[in-house]
Amino acid sequence: MYAAQYEELEVGLASLPSATPVRLQGRTLMILGDHVIYPLRYAKKDVPVTAARLRRATGFRADLIRRHGPEPMQQAFDLGLDELDEQEPHPDLALLSEDVKLVLVAYACSMTQGVMRIEWGSAELRSEDRYLIWHHHEPLHLPPRRETPLLLDH
């Protein structure tokens, strides 16, 4: 399922005239104009996108959100000390222009229920607890669920 989210996004957006694929961390992401589109499964159950949080506060996803997400609504409290735990961002992020903005396509999905919720928008990452703070988000409408067809013996 992990790889399928990137593949589906690429297939869905590739036909748009301004869509450009870029390989980051071994996956193809799509750039539309000056926005990189990133899929994010935030839950395995039907919960609001405002409950979304990353598993880790470090790594590619966290660095992508920090570097290309919106400016934080509330600036970090500055004590005038240098950040001791500041790490270099993921090297693949150098492949993106600093001007590129991040659009998250966040969804709740399980193997048994499929996609239950899907929204798009922009969010910052709160480092102390890994929750996303949404600056803007709105739902994408899901197509009606298909019932599994009955197979009849002839």
Image (cartoon, rainbow, N blue to C red):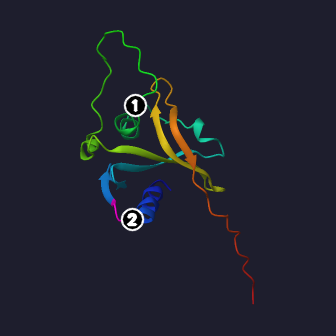
- Judge the density around disc 1: few (<14), some (14-19), many (≥20) Cα neighbours within 10 Å: few
What's the mark number on residue 71?
1
Q: Is residue 62 rendered magenta in the image?
A: no
Q: Residue at x 71, y 69 (%)?
A: 147
Provide the secondary structure element on which disc 2 rests: loop
Query: At label 1, which amino acid type do we have?
Result: Glu
Q: Residue at x 73, y 77 (%)?
A: 150
Residue range corresponding to the magenta coloring: 14-19
Q: Residue at x 36, y 40 (%)?
A: 60
Query: At label 2, which amino acid type do we have?
Result: Leu
1 or 2: tag closer to the N-terminus: 2
Locate residue 103, reporting x and y percent.
43, 46
- Judge the density around disc 2: few (<14), some (14-19), many (≥20) Cα neighbours within 10 Å: few
Locate residue 12, reporting x and y percent.
45, 64
Q: Main secondary structure of the magenta part?
A: loop
What's the mark number on residue 14?
none
18 or 82, which is in the foreground? 18
Provide the secondary structure element on which disc 1 rests: loop
Q: Is residue 15 rendered magenta in the image?
A: yes
Left or right of 98 on screen, residue 61:
right
What's the mark number on residue 16?
2
